[in-house]
Amino acid sequence: MLNNLISIDPTIRSGKPCIRTLRITVYDILNMLASGMSYEEILEDFPKLTRQDIFASLQYAADREHRTSLVKISA
């Protein structure tokens, strides 16, 4: 599974999910992709990242979305 590349440490970026021990968050990667950056552009801007890191971010987000459930609040 790719998510062994994601780390959560309360002392790094306020505990947000980060790529390995880097200070680059899953959110950062997703935001770059959403803004239209290509994998190649991201890797050029952040040479310590790999394609696997980007895939792990996408998988992490997909897993989080899959586990999201609707909670019905009674009136």
Image (cartoon, grey):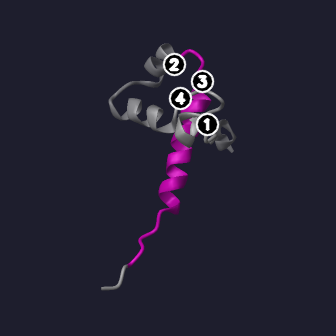
**Helix, strand or loop under label 1:** loop
* Label 3 neighbour load within 10 Å: few <14, some 14-19, many 20+: some
Q: Residue 18 in magenta?
A: no
Residue 2 - label: none
* Label 1 neighbour load within 10 Å: few <14, some 14-19, many 20+: few
| Residue at screen point 61% across, 31% down | 52
Q: In which quarter of the image is residue 35?
A: top left
Query: Is tag 2's residue or tag 3's residue first in the polypeptide sequence?
Result: 2
Magenta residues, dominant SS class: helix
Vertically, is 74 above or below 20? below
Q: Do the residues labelled 2 and 4 touch (CB within 8 Å)?
A: no
- Number of callouts: 4
Query: Is tag 2's residue or tag 4's residue first in the polypeptide sequence?
Result: 4
* Circle 3 residue: 50
Q: Quadrant of residue 53?
A: top right
Would you say 75 lies left or right of 49 here? left
User: What's the amino acid at mark 1?
Assistant: Thr
Would you say 14 lies left or right of 52 here? left
* Circle 4 residue: 24
Q: What stretch is highlighted in magenta?
A: 46-72
* Circle 2 residue: 43
Q: How far apart are marks 2 and 1 (CA)?
A: 25 Å
Vertically, is 75 above or below 63? below
Q: How far apart are marks 4 and 1 (CA)?
A: 13 Å
